Image: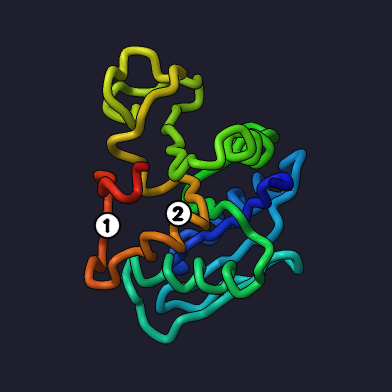
């Protein structure tokens, strides 16, 4: 398999333009660029976006699931994305190697479905409740994922092809528990 290509999807309601800009700046600083970056205005107009960002303005708020599905479909249409990274508009990639490390993880395990990000404060500390797996004593130790952070995660496109997208009926999804099909 060739090196997995990462696409980034950001959902916004237009009420955090400064945070969105900071997030996009952190994506631009990656030492391995994302293949594509899509920002979906979920029922809201988008602010000015950099030229390298694909903007999609939806007439109505489709909810988290619906908005993510729109971004996923756009990335799928582009045809050269193997891994989808969903980010909330108030997130931030604090290191320049996030996209490279995500691609490395998927390259090393072609059956990998989901990689969950973790929430860390400005000192790097992660509260136990934000460690997205069982046996959370060491937030840096890997483990089988049983839950994953809704605001920052990577999803295998082949896995999504197999299990489908987000359930549109779930207008709001938060700190999701994996379905067995998604965790294999």
Q: Is residue 139 above or below residue 44?
A: above
Q: CA distance from mark 2 to mark 1?
A: 19 Å
Name the residue at 72% across, 42% down. 30
Q: Which residue is mark 2?
A: 159
Q: Secondary structure at mark 1?
A: loop
Q: Is residue 171 left or right of residue 126?
A: left
Q: Is residue 109 above or below residue 62?
A: above
Q: Considering depth in this image, is 91 or 30 the residue closer to the camera?
A: 30
Label 2–label 1 contact, CB within 8 A: no
| Residue at (43, 38) in percent of width and height | 116
Label 2 residue SS: helix
Q: Is residue 82 visible to the viewer in this orientation of the structure?
A: yes
- The residue lying toward the viewer, choosing from 40 and 71, is 71
The answer to which quarter of the image holds residue 138 is top left
- Where residue 134 appears, as percent x and y from the top left, is 27, 24
Most extreme residue toward the bottom is 59
């Amino acid at each position: 398999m060739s090196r997995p290509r990462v696409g980034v999807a950001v959902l916004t309601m237009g009420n955090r333009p400064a945070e969105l800009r900071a997030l996009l700046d952190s994506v631009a600083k990656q030492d391995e660029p994302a293949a594509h970056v899509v920002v979906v205005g979920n029922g809201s107009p988008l602010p000015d976006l950099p030229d390298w960002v694909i903007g999609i303005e939806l007439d109505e708020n489709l909810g988290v699931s619906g908005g993510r599905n729109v971004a996923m479909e756009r990335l799928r249409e582009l045809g050269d994305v193997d891994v989808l990274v969903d980010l909330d508009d108030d997130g931030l990639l604090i290191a320049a190697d996030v996209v490279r490390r995500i691609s490395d993880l998927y390259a090393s395990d072609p059956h990998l479905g989901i990689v969950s990000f973790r929430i860390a404060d400005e000192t790097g500390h992660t509260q136990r409740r934000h460690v997205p797996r069982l046996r959370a004593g060491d937030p840096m130790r890997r483990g089988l994922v049983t839950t994953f952070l809704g605001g920052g995660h990577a999803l295998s496109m082949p896995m999504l092809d197999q299990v489908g997208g987000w359930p549109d009926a779930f207008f709001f999804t938060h700190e999701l528990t994996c379905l067995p099909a998604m965790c294999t």
